C-alpha cells in the first residue's frame, strides 16, 4: 500500500487550486474556473498519513500547469525530488460526459485517471487491482480553496468505496502565474 500512496501523490492536483466559485455559476463554469486557476507554478508539501491520520513522512515538490486548449485542457508536470518522481498530467473538462477529469503518468508508465462531476471538488479513480491481489480505489477532495492556495486530501478504499482511510494531505501554495 505504501507504493500506492507514493504514486497517489502524483494525482493530488486532480483537486487543483481555484478561487471559490459563485453558488450561482453552472457546474461547467465552476470547472472551467478550476482550470483557469490551476495554471501557474505551485510549491507543494505532501504529508503521507498513517491509518490513524498522523503524519508518517513529509516531502516537498512542485506542480506546474499551462494551457493546451483554453478553457478546456491544461497540461502539467509534477516533480518531487526527494522521491525522485516526475509525472506528466492532463487536467480537462468533458462537457459531453459532464465530468472534470485528470490523468497522470509517471516513469512506471501506469496511467492514473481521476474523475468527478462537473463543478465538484471530489474525484475518484476507477477500482484497480492492488499489489496484494485485492482491489483499491483513490478519492481526492480539494478544500480551503483561495486564489493562491488550497489543500487536498487523498483517501483510499480497499472495499469498493464502502470505507475510506487517510492516504495523504497536500498543501499547495502558488509560486507564479504565467503572463497573459
Image (cartoon, grey):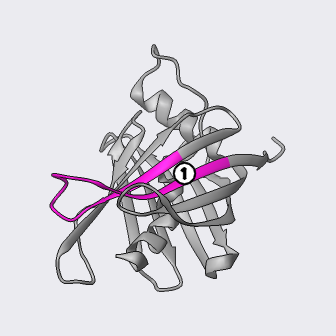
**Residue in front for this viewpoint, 32 or 23:** 23
Q: At which x and y percent is residue 6?
A: 48, 73
Residue 154 coordinates in the image, percent (x, y): 42, 55
Extreme-right residue of the structure: 179
Determine the residue located farthest toward the top in the rendered image: 24
Hey, which quadrant is residue 70 in on the image?
A: top right
Examine the structure image and report whether residue 84 is included in the region drawn in magenta: no
Residue shown at 22% from the left, 83% from the top: 132
Q: Secondary structure at mark 1?
A: strand
Rendering quarter of residue 180: top right
Left or right of 111? Residue 79 is: right
Q: Which residues are magenta?
A: 152-172
How would you classify the magenta stretch by its main secondary structure? strand
Residue lying at 39% horizontally and 68% vertically, measured from the top left: 112
Identity of the residue drawn at 62% across and 61% down: 76
Residue depicted at 64% across the width and 32% down the height? 146
Q: Residues within 10 Å of mark 1 (few under 14, many from 20)?
A: some
* Side of 19 relative to 2 (left or right): right
- Give the image location of residue 67, x and y in percent: 65, 51
Screen quadrant of the N terminus: bottom left
User: Is 170 in the magenta?
Assistant: yes
Which residue is the site of mark 1? 73
Vertical placement of 62 versus 18: above or below? below
Q: Is residue 154 left or right of residue 75?
A: left
Amino acid at each position: 500500500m505504501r507504493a500506492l500512496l507514493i504514486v497517489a501523490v502524483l494525482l493530488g492536483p486532480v483537486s487543483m487550486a481555484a478561487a471559490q466559485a459563485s453558488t450561482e455559476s453552472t457546474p461547467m463554469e465552476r470547472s472551467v474556473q478550476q482550470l483557469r486557476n490551476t495554471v501557474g507554478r505551485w510549491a507543494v508539501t505532501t504529508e503521507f498519513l498513517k491509518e490513524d491520520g498522523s503524519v508518517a513522512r513529509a516531502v516537498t515538490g512542485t506542480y506546474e500547469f499551462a494551457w493546451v486548449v483554453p478553457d478546456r485542457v491544461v497540461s502539467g508536470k509534477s516533480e518531487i525530488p526527494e522521491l525522485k518522481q516526475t509525472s506528466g498530467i492532463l487536467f480537462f473538462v468533458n462537457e459531453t460526459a459532464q465530468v472534470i477529469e485528470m490523468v497522470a503518468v509517471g516513469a512506471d508508465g501506469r496511467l492514473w485517471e481521476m474523475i468527478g462531476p462537473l463543478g465538484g471538488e471530489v474525484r475518484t479513480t476507477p477500482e484497480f487491482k492492488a499489489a496484494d491481489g485485492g482491489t483499491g480505489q483513490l478519492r481526492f477532495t480539494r478544500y480551503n480553496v483561495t486564489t493562491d492556495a488550497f489543500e487536498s486530501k487523498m483517501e483510499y478504499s480497499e472495499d469498493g468505496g464502502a470505507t475510506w482511510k487517510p492516504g495523504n494531505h497536500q498543501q499547495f501554495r502558488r509560486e507564479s502565474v504565467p503572463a497573459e
